[in-house]
Image (cartoon, rainbow, N blue to C red):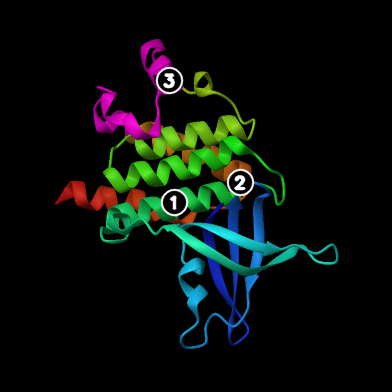
Amino acid sequence: MGVVLSRQNWGEADKLVTLYTEEFGKLRARCVGVNKPGRKMKALCEPFILAEFRLHTGYRTDVAKIIGGQLVSSFPLVRSDYRRMLTAFSFCEMMSQASSERVPNPDKYELIVSALRALEGGVSPWMMPVYGLKLLQLTGQGPAESFAMDGDLKARLDAARMESLEALPYPSPLAGELESAVAERLEDYAGRRLRCPDALRQWNAEAAAC
């Protein structure tokens, strides 16, 4: 099982995808001939889909080969809404930048899957900051206590599940401040600007100003 974090063309007919898998962690894989008309595996190469992948992993290359698979979920409601789609892209970019290749982490896999499933159900202003905090903890970059928050909020965030963030009775401006602080910490860890979270923050700011 795995989630497609990103994909790009490789040559004229192939795609190179980055997966976060249950068994291998982050993994690059090549899907041969998928850009040709009528190829059945094209759906398996789309960003933030969840699928069962059949992979061939060799010892001579760090790029696996996708030889088959079965779609589990494409998260259609996420794809039908621009804000949700930007959030999903952000989840995937953050996971990719915070993960080394072929280092399995079941908790990271569960985090990205639960985040996408929660996003399919709706949007909460707490999704990005809570996801980012949990990801930082899983990469060893510090718990929620390292951010400036009151004790009650720290306890709630530690216990929060991606599927039940509506239980957090705090206004969105506070969530936005924490989201920016978490993104800054992740960017320091990655060593570069994270494009999708930055685009999401800009879109949210413009939507709030309307």
Is the residue marked by circle 1 packed among few (<14), some (14-19), or many (20+) residues within 10 Å?
many
Segment colored magenta: 149-175
Label 2 vs label 3: CA separation? 23 Å
The residue tagged with tag 3: helix, strand or loop? helix
The residue tagged with tag 2: helix, strand or loop? loop
- 76 left or right of 98? left
**Residue beneath label 1, please?**
90
Residue 18 sits in which quadrant? bottom right
Residue 146, how many percent across, how many down? 53, 21
| Amino acid type, callout 1 | Ser
Q: Main secondary structure of the magenta part?
A: helix
Q: Is residue 16 magenta?
A: no
- What residue is at 45 percent from the left and 37 percent from the top? 131
* Front position among marks 3 and 1: 3
**Residue beneath label 2, please?**
22
| Amino acid type, callout 3 | Ala
**Residue beneath label 3, please?**
159
- 152 left or right of 80? right
Residue 10 sits in which quadrant? bottom right
